[in-house]
Image (tube, coloured by chain):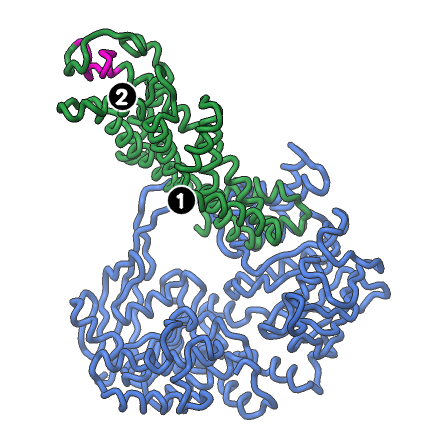
């Protein structure tokens, strides 16, 4: 093929692992992966964390993070072998023929320099254009990426634009030197769904207009289906399946791909509300500090015993503030919180131990929600000791029961959090909450930091526990798919207010208000042409745009 | 205890040697502490391994007894400063608000006065005894530890696991000693090595100025003072304590570095 831009053959990438208490050993991160990318085509690389997709993406720049070694195979770019090429060759290549768009734009921009300066920096460095030509091109790209005020956008500093805009500015930076290939490394993962869709549309337009080839790395199959021509599914550094988008989505061959596609298809029938709600939030308003805007204004919702209320909304909608108000970390300015009909003291310090026990919390980042210096047994055992006075054998026995309940076997009790995987950590946090035998657990984005398949497992576990223990959940999330899977009733939050509230079947059924429509339609679907369809039919655009 | 790096082994060996010599001083020292056994400033010989001092006392004996006092005072002062400084620092961080402001500003006030001058003033008023010395040094040094532990604890205090403990209803004591302290150990250990050496330098300085350990008791600063005139005649007696201080400093910090590596290792390490 004459127009093959990038060809990777039998790529092998290794690193040395320094595991605690063991001798350093060699780990194979990517094994025998081959791909060929034609000019102007987009290939999606998809897989869970640790699948090696980012590593392969960076290998196209002949770059390895940390102690990574590109130890075998060929990387041929524009007919030139670049694996093991000299530093000079690589310097002339990076930022000219291949460019890179990172996941966190906020961390990738220098906060002290204006956007324009950074966007055209690589172009000028390689001497590809004059200053004025480069600036003109950047403005064109800003326009293509539908950034506001393309003429003056470059004069702003990174902190003056939103996350979605910054991500598009980075795309402009990558496209500015007219590269042959752009590596997109999870460019929309850190964004809200409603923002993600705009960035996605912008990237797609920009790719189409500039005719650049791209490797698009993500863990979200639905996203990659919108922008790619081909998809490669990776797992644990090996290729699982490779095909056109249509074939992968509509007729996946491998079981793993099928699992990825059918993820979050949990069928959960909603329960009817009981006459006596467990938790009632009544006309609550709250703000941080004494002056300023209310973060929550006049919010009223109910959670029924043994059921799940999902709080949905984008970042800044007040979801997590709600959790802080209910737990007493942030006493409300107005309004009341009733637990089983009785008013809870607004501030944490005035609540009794019994009141605290009945209301537990699970956090988004299981990593930081556990003391890294305590073993799993100590973490789960503490609530048992604290609330029930269990000690010695009785305590150990109950800890083992809880470990069984979260489907972690023997031997996990002696481990430290750093020795657990992301999903296992979240399970331990669930066990810690369960140990208190609570009536209500607040789950704050508990699955958003996890890979889809792992998140699926956590949701199933939560549903299962609800069935067995009769615990109610207040489930905070921005992910509609999760809500569909787990909720009995839903409250849609927007700018500190409850926009729409009721049983799941009512909230998710038309007619929608504009915001709920935007939120629902922004969730990527595993359908070809979904993106174009949504952009044409939606009623409002995201506030974060 | 496998896999101790060579540097740490060396550090452990030398530190251990100094501490053992200090503990068993009366049994190891070849002569009595203030016993005059020879001429003034005799050179090193098989009889007097390090020579004799300005009064004809055996210098090795003086060094061993001096090490005992110096290391004891420095260790105790460091213990006082770390106990006090870290507990107060954590308390300020955990309570926050007015408590934190009052404690931190008071701390700033004490820190703004040069340590040596402050100590000299206090010691010229108070009787110079070992407990007073240790307390004064410990208190003055605790201001540094306070700042460090407060800064470290403020960061840890906002982590989700501390919030989880609060939501469980744990008291401040649990939060300080069980949630924050284990995670603040690494920077504190690093500081410990450094502070111990500063304490040795401090007590030596005080003794050199005549406000530290009082004669006839020996300590390293005092030995320098007694023998300083010898330098003019090319007598190395005053340099011996300096060598001791240097070797002890380096070896203690080698051990501290190693402890630091261990506590920040992946297993149970923060953010590992």
Residues packed near mark 1 inside 10 Å, few (<14), some (14 to 19) or many (20 plus)? some
- The N terminus of chain B: image quadrant: top left
For the point 22% across and 16% down, the residue is B54
Decide if residue B1 is on the left or right side of residue A522: left
Q: Nearer the viewer, residue A299 or B134?
A: B134
Circle 2 chain: B
Which mark identifies residue B226?
Answer: 2
Instruction: Magenta stretch: give its range.
Output: B47-60
Chain given the colour green: B
| A197 versus A405 height, above or below | below
Q: Position of residue A4 (x, y in %)?
A: 25, 81
Between A260 and B158, the one nearer to me in the picture: B158
Q: How many marks can you see?
A: 2
Q: Which residue is mark 1?
A: B265
Q: Is residue B55 magenta?
A: yes
* Chain that is blue in the image: A
Residue A297 shown in magenta: no
SS at mark 1 in the image: loop
A196 horizontally vs A15: left or right: right
């Amino acid at each position: 093929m004459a127009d093959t831009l990038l060809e990777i053959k039998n790529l092998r990438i290794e690193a040395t692992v320094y595991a605690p208490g063991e001798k350093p050993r060699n780990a194979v991160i990517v094994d025998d992966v081959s791909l060929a990318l034609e000019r102007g085509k987009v290939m999606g690389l998809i897989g869970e964390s640790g699948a090696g997709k980012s590593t392969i993406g960076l290998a196209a720049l002949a770059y390895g993070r940390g102690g990574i070694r590109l130890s075998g195979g060929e990387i041929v770019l524009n007919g030139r072998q670049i694996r093991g090429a000299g530093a000079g060759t690589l310097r002339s290549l990076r930022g000219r023929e291949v460019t890179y768009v990172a996941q966190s734009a906020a961390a990738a921009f220098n906060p002290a320099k204006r956007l324009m300066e950074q966007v055209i920096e690589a172009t000028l460095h390689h001497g590809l254009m004059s200053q004025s030509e480069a600036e003109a091109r950047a403005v064109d790209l800003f326009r293509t990426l539908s950034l506001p005020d393309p003429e003056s956008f470059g004069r702003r500093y990174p902190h003056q634009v939103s996350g979605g805009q910054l991500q598009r500015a980075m795309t402009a930076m990558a496209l500015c030197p007219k590269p042959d290939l752009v590596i997109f490394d999870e460019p929309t993962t850190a964004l809200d769904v409603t923002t993600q869709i705009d960035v996605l549309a912008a990237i797609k337009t920009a790719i189409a207009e500039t005719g650049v080839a791209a490797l698009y790395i993500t863990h979200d199959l639905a996203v990659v289906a919108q922008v790619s021509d081909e998809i490669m599914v990776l797992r644990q550094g090996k290729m699982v399946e490779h095909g056109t988008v249509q074939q992968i989505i509509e007729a996946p061959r491998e079981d793993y791909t099928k699992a990825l596609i059918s993820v979050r298809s949990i069928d959960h029938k909603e329960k009817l509300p009981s006459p006596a709600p467990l938790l009632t939030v009544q006309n609550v308003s709250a703000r941080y500090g004494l002056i300023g805007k209310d973060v929550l204004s006049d919010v009223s919702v109910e959670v029924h015993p043994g059921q799940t209320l999902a709080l949905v909304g984008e970042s800044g909608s007040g979801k997590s503030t709600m959790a802080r108000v209910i737990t007493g970390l942030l006493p409300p300015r107005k309004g009341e919180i009733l637990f089983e009909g009785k008013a809870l003291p607004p501030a944490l310090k005035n609540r009794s131990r019994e009141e605290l026990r009945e209301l537990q919390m699970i956090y988004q980042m299981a990593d930081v929600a556990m003391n890294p210096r305590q073993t799993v047994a100590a973490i789960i055992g503490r609530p048992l000791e604290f609330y029930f006075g269990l000690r010695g054998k009785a305590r150990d026995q109950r800890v083992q029961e809880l470990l069984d309940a979260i489907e972690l076997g023997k031997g996990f009790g002696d481990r430290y959090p750093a020795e657990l995987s992301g999903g296992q950590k979240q399970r331990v946090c669930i066990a810690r909450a369960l140990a208190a035998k609570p009536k209500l657990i607040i789950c704050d984005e508990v699955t958003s930091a996890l890979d889809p398949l792992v998140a699926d497992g956590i949701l199933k576990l939560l549903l299962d526990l609800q069935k067995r223990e009769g615990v109610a959940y207040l489930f905070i999330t921005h992910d509609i798919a999760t809500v569909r899977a787990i909720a009995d009733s839903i409250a849609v939050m927007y700018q500190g207010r409850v926009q729409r509230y009721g049983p799941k079947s009512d909230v998710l059924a038309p007619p929608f208000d504009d915001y709920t429509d935007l939120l629902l339609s922004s969730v990527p679907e595993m359908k070809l042409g979904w993106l174009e369809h949504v952009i044409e039919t939606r009623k409002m655009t995201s506030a974060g745009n | 205890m496998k896999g101790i790096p060579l540097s740490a082994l060396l550090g452990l060996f030398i530190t251990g040697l100094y501490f053992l010599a200090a503990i068993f001083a009366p049994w190891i020292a070849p002569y009595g502490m203030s016993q005059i056994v020879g001429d003034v400033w005799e050179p090193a010989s098989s009889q007097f391994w390090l020579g004799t001092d300005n009064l004809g006392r055996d210098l090795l004996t003086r060094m061993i007894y001096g090490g005992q006092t110096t290391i004891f005072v420095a260790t105790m002062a460091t213990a006082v400063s770390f106990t006090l400084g870290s507990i107060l620092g954590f308390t300020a961080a955990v309570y926050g608000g007015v408590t934190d402001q009052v404690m931190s500003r008071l701390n700033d006030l004490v820190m703004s006065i040069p340590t040596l001058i402050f100590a000299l003033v206090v010691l010229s008023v108070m009787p110079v005894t070992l407990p007073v010395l240790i307390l004064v040094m410990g208190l003055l040094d605790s201001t540094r530890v306070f700042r460090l532990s407060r800064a470290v604890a403020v960061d840890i205090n906002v982590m989700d696991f501390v919030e989880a403990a609060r939501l469980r209803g744990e008291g401040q004591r649990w939060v300080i000693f069980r949630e924050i302290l284990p995670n603040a150990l690494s920077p504190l250990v690093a500081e410990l090595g450094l502070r111990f050496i500063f304490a040795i330098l401090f007590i030596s300085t005080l003794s050199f100025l005549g406000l530290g350990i009082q004669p006839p008791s020996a300590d390293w600063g005092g030995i320098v003072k007694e023998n300083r005139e010898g330098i003019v005649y090319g007598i190395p007696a005053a340099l011996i304590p300096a060598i001791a201080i240097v070797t002890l400093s380096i070896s203690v910090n080698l051990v501290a570095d190693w402890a630091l590596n261990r506590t920040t290792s992946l297993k149970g390490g923060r953010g590992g």
